[in-house]
Amino acid sequence: MPAPTQDSAQIRAPDEDGGVPDGVGRYSLTALRGGRWLHMGVAATAVAGVAGAFAFTAGWIAPSRLSQGRVIDRFEQVNGVHPGFRRNHAKGLCFTGWFDSNGAGARLSKAVVFEPERTPVFGRFALAGGQPYQADAPNTVRSMAINFALTDGEIWRTGMNNIPVFPVRDVRGFYDQLAAARPDPATGKPNPEHMNAFLASHPETVRASALIKAQPPTGGFADATYNSLNAFRLVDASGVSTPVRWSMAAEDPVRASQPASVGSQDRNQLFDDLIARMNTGPARWRLLVTVGQPGDPTNDATVPWPADRQRLDVGTLTVERVEDEGDGVCRDVNFDPLILPDGIAPSDDPLLSARSATYSESFSRRAGEPKTPSAVQLSSNTEGTRQ
Amino acid sequence: MTAPIVFPAASRILHWLMAAMILTMLFIGVGMVTFPENYHWMLAVHRPLGAAILVLAALRLLNRLFNPPPALPPDMPGLMRALAHASHIVLYVLMFAVPLAGWAALSAGGYPIVLYGSLRLPPILPHSAPLYAVVHTAHVVLALLLFATFLAHLGAALAHALVFRDGVFEQMSAFRAATRRHRDTPVQ
């Protein structure tokens, strides 16, 4: 803001408006003959400059920027567009239940969910990948997403996978891996040249893949343990922050994984197995908080923490029943891992913000799309053969 | 004449404060959806800043009732005058509509509307994905319209300051109140 003189801070009379020829209104185009082109140019340049900065920020003139829109575009290129479905973890089943905190977590976090009380939850079991009618396969990553409705009205959402570490450490790696792993139309398998080129420039993915392969999947959804993968911070009432990762560890005894649907027509083998399991009664998981020590990487989900880290049992998740997505509570919910209550905070892991951003983009795209029935239906759980 | 020469101080403070907030907000709005690794902190600023803009917009509308703006120069052509009035109506409508649409979108999307820590706003629409799609699109379109209107406003302000030199820009840019209004009245 300039500091005008007293005289400038008032409406000027036309006749004191130097530079405009006599008898010509100062608002007339002819007034510009009075040498005001330069000033007009300054004004136009200022407007164009602000507009240009805005266009750059919005990515309109930065086509190489890896925006969340481009990440989701790539999911659609690899998997095709399946309107109404999540662009990743597209095939799933809703659940409802509750979480009984034992109070042990309150030592590290002021979040109400860690006080010794019951928190209602709903959530979603899903398979990684953007194809909502893909056939279940044991090696496909399984996920558990949860919405905790805290008693003070806050919401905590978390999405966890049954693998020990994440294969990539940032959004660029994720984007490039999607392309490298894209099945070749000719063979139906990823092109080894593309994958080898990706792995050559991503040694962290090579190391993470070895860890993932070393931990074979369990028999189903109910006996699987799901890991936060990303680090977070628990914050106590005095503001002390502790780096953590967490896991939902199944109480069901682990069964060996079955080979992929040999001789079976059931494309929903894993989900139908879960539905059958739920018919026998609630399934439970213990929420284990792994407490990080100084030096444990919080910004790299490809690296495991040392095995001897303290694992604090903070309570039990009870999944009471499952519901298919059509009637279920989970379909139109974005399980954004950064929807956190006061007392749980993000770490410095860049993947967290990128997950939050891309989940939001996926949610915004699918929210307005027409819905078709999900592959997994409770009412007729042998009808998994759509598509 | 008793017409004020410059905008009253409250109006000028509200104007420049909100100008900075709204411009920041518009840049954050388009930036957070194209920089995924900065999305979280930008969104964390976006929500409380939007709520603050909505509150200030209400204050500003009230202020305008009690502190009417100064008159435009009498020789300003009718079309320019009409455009000035229309663009200000659009600016006022959008100062309310954009944050309200954002709040409505978070509500319909089933998101908690967190301002800071455990401080939240209540939802103003039921959780509904189709509703979210409509309101979220409206939020984006109206925000882009607000930016376009802001550009027109900026261009007009600079034209008044540099090209027309009619004192209209100084009505808002003045640091101090016009203490000489009783001696030097605007041209009649």
Image (tube, coloured by chain):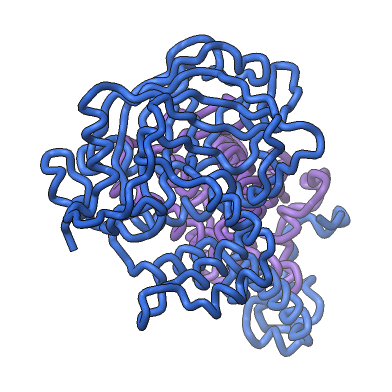
Chain colours: A blue, B purple
Q: Is residue A51 visible?
A: yes
Q: Residue at x 63, y 18 (%)?
A: A110
Against B95, is B112 above or below?
A: above
Query: Which quadrant of the figure contains the N terminus of chain A?
Result: bottom right
**Whether residue B71 is visible:** no
| Residue at 79% across, 55% down | A9
Tell me if A229 is positioned left or right of B127 in this view: right
Tell me which corner region of the image, top left, top right, bottom left or bottom right, holds residue B14: top right
Between A346 and A273, the one nearer to me in the picture: A273
**Residue visible at 19% across and 57% down?**
A263
Give residue A283's quadrant in the image.
Answer: top left
Vertical position of residue B112 compared to residue B153: above or below: above
Q: Nearer the viewer, residue A300 or B116?
A: A300
Q: Give the total number of marks visible in the rendering.
A: 0
Give the residue displayed 76% in from the left and 77% down from the top.
A42
Q: Is residue B108 above or below residue B160?
A: above
Q: Quadrant of the C terminus of chain A?
A: bottom left
Side (left or right) of A100 relative to A35: left
Q: Nearer the viewer, residue B137 or B85?
A: B137
Residue A360 appears at what percent x and percent y?
47, 51
Which of A211/A267 is in front? A211
Image location of residue A48, percent across then percent down: 67, 75
Q: Position of residue A308 (x, y in %)?
A: 70, 30
